[in-house]
Image (cartoon, rainbow, N blue to C red):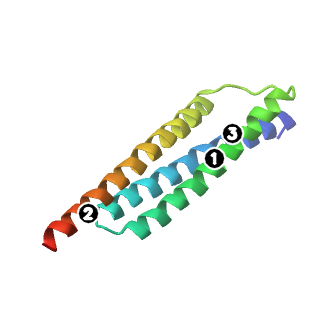
Amino acid sequence: MSATQEMNEEFERVIISIVSYSGEAKGYAYEALTLSEQGEFEEAEAMMEQCNVSVRKAHAVQTELIRQEISGEKIVVSMIMVHAQDHLMTTLSERELIRKMIEQNRRLHRLEQALLNQ
């Protein structure tokens, strides 16, 4: 295997890690949403923290690629790279929306409890 092939395979592994961490984060966020719908808010918050950990990992990989490009290394923009970036950005957007939905579920839960306790 040539050095170029090894570099390409390593680059692909790095890009796939962004997709993987992003998917992991999205899964945690949706699990948190489900928990909040069940009134399990402490568990939902813990799941959102797991989401944040995965997002930070994906972002660290992305930041390293940006650092490499800024320092003069040529970064190949491939379809898998575009997919990874799209996946990460979608995850970030959905995480923020889910965070707001969890807060709405918390408010709804409080209102339901207040009505039931009258």
Q: Which mark is residue 62?
A: 3
Residue type, mark 3 in image: Gln
User: Is residue 91 shown above or below 54?
Assistant: above
Distance CA(mark 3)–CA(mark 2): 38 Å
- Label 3 or label 2, whichever lies nearer to me, is 2
Residue type, mark 1 in image: Ala
Ranked by sequence position, the earlier of labels 1 and 2 is 1
Distance CA(mark 1)–CA(mark 3): 6 Å
> Which residue is more in the foreground, 77 or 101?
101
Residue contact at pointers 1 and 3, CB within 8 angstroms:
yes
Look at the image and tell me in which quarter the C terminus lies.
bottom left
- Label 1 or label 2, whichever lies nearer to me, is 2
Quick one: SS at disc 2?
helix
Look at the image and tell me in which quarter the N terminus lies.
top right
Q: Residues within 10 Å of mark 1 (few under 14, many from 20)?
A: many
| Residue 63 image point, x, y percent | 72, 39
Left or right relative to 9: residue 88:
left
Residue contact at pointers 3 and 2, CB within 8 angstroms:
no
Quarter residue 3 falls in:
top right
